[in-house]
Amino acid sequence: MRALAIMYHDVVEGGDYAASGFAGEAAHIYKLSRQEFASHLQAIAAVASGSIAVMAGRRQWSEPLPVFLTFDDGGVSACPLVADMLEQHHWKGHFFITTTRIGEAGFLGEARIRELDSRGHVVGSHSHTHPTRMAATRPAEMEREWRVSLDRLSGIVGHPVTVASLPGGYYSRQVGQAAASAGVEVLFTSEPTAAVTIVDGCLVLGRYAVKRGMGPEWPAGFAANQRSFCWRQTALWKAKRLAKALGGEAYVRARKSILER
């Protein structure tokens, strides 16, 4: 089983990167301008319009290689801005919410989350507190992160929420097991791969990440499964994974310091 998933975060206007989602350059590098995002959607439509799909729960899909568009953190740009832009292409997205941030400045409130759900977009968990290194936490804490978030979101939308994405990019099999135990049926990670694995019944999918300044050829290349784009990001990700493993918390601090100088 294979699938392609593209990871976005926020879309902002006028260069106001702090307007939606988490603040700080470590988060801002993942935020696109409205114009950038519009060009990305056009490029994706040119190569994969008929393959854009939604994953509402654990199932096998009919498309030979579906493309999932995902948006992390739960920033206010998700609704109505991003949802409106997706719907112009007759697409739906997956919006992953950090539940401790619901209703805070720059983040979606409950009414907007319900609106996304009612419009046919997938609402999912991005954990409860957004731990930077989920794989380094205790198993009981991992499961609590998922379970509390799923319960909160299920109460907001009025039906079970079973889809999630991993914050921070630190994945381990234990993270997948904790997610499955908490009720997650589909978990998106940050590993750039089209391979799909199953951990205790939970589907685990990778994603190709988009950052500010990446031209529209990048998401189009991901959506078309072009090796020149997919493999380049995979090689970079593997190098970063090694640095993360060797550096631990020191890697996180160093990255933040460099980005926010």
Image (spheres, rainbow, N blue to C red):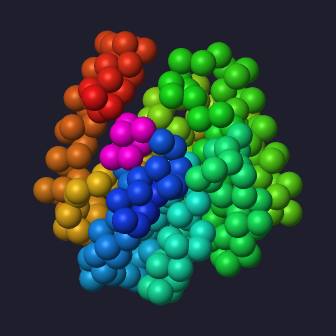
Location of residue 112 by image quarter = bottom right
Residue plotted at (66% across, 58% down): 108
The number of callouts visible is 0
Residue 107 pos. (x, y %): 62, 53
**Relative to residue 16, is residue 101 drawn left or right?**
right
Residue 91 pos. (x, y %): 50, 79
**Residue 203 higher or lower than 167, as above or below:** below
**Residue 205 higher or lower than 4, as above or below:** above
Residue 87 pos. (x, y %): 52, 83
**Residue 117 higher or lower than 257, as above or below:** below
Q: Nearer the viewer, residue 148 or 18?
A: 18
Residue reaching furthest left?
Answer: 228
**Relative to residue 122, is residue 156 drawn left or right?**
right
Quadrant, the N terminus? bottom left
Q: Nearer the viewer, residue 19 or 49?
A: 19
Tell me, yes or no, if residue 96 can be seen here: no
**Relative to residue 142, is residue 249 drawn left or right?**
left
Quadrant, the C terminus? top left
Q: Nearer the viewer, residue 194 or 27?
A: 27
Tell me, yes or no, if residue 127 can be seen here: yes
**Which secondary structure type mostly characterizes the magenta part of the structure?**
helix
Residue plotted at (86% across, 55% down): 155
Residue plotted at (47% across, 34% down): 168
Q: Which residues are magenta?
A: 24-29
Residue plotted at (54% across, 40% down): 166
Residue 224 pos. (x, y %): 27, 69
**Relative to residue 83, is residue 63 drawn left or right?**
left
Q: Magenta span has 47? A: no
